[in-house]
Amino acid sequence: MKTFFDFSATGIDGKEINMSEFKGKKILVVNTASKCGFTPQYTDLEKLYREFGPEKFVILGFPANNFLWQEPKSNEEIARFCSLNYNVTFPMFAKISVKGKNQHPIYEWLTKKELNGKADIKVKWNFQKFMINERGEWIDFVAPGESPYSEKIVNWLRLA
């Protein structure tokens, strides 16, 4: 069975990034959008990243335009938006599809039990959060409307 570290994705700057670069860290994977009611979660995501990362924890942001066209911007515009409005320093990736026929392989793995070995999960909206352990194993997820500082995420990050 594949782990999260068997995948790669294009960074928002156009460079290919192997997920194996994040071995040994807890990973929070989040599908993002700039025109969503949950977009202000970028503030808490960045705060969480600064508090718990970057040595043992990383947040990976995957912009997606799957829900009511709430991410219409280009990769360059997304990078600028995140930097100027939310001072985002965690890794952001090029815009992908998180569901449907063009679903990115990372999200296919995140959402299908036959691939991740844990659960079948639908991506319900922007800012759904997936928790991956230091060995690249799927651990759990947090609903889009829940804060990045949800008890589930914070307790997981505090575990040794």
Image (cartoon, rainbow, N blue to C red):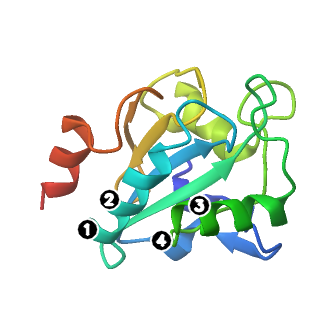
Q: Earlier in the sequence, mark 2 or mark 3?
A: 2
Viewer-side label of 4, 3:
3
Q: Which mark is residue 51?
A: 1
Separation (CA) of disc 4 from disc 1: 17 Å
Viewer-side label of 4, 1:
1
Q: Which mark is residue 48?
A: 2
Left or right, 111 with respect to 70, comes to: left
Separation (CA) of disc 2 from disc 1: 5 Å
Left or right, 22 with respect to 135, comes to: right
Q: Are marks 2 and 1 in contact (CB under 8 Å)?
A: yes
Separation (CA) of disc 1 from disc 3: 19 Å
Three-letter code, disc 4? Phe
Q: What's the residue at 22%, 55% (across, down)?
A: 157
Viewer-side label of 1, 3:
3
Q: How would you rate the neighbour count of disc 1 (Cα within 10 Å): few for under 14, some for 14-19, many for 20 or more?
A: few
Q: Are marks 4 and 3 in contact (CB under 8 Å)?
A: no
Query: From the viewer's perspective, is residue 134 above or below residue 123?
Result: below
Three-letter code, disc 1? Glu
Q: For mark 4, what is the residue?
A: 22
Q: What's the residue at 43%, 71% (across, down)?
A: 23
Q: Earlier in the sequence, mark 4 or mark 1?
A: 4
Q: For mark 3, what is the residue?
A: 85
- Asked which secondary structure carries label 3, the reply is helix
Q: Position of residue 92 (x, y in %)?
A: 63, 63
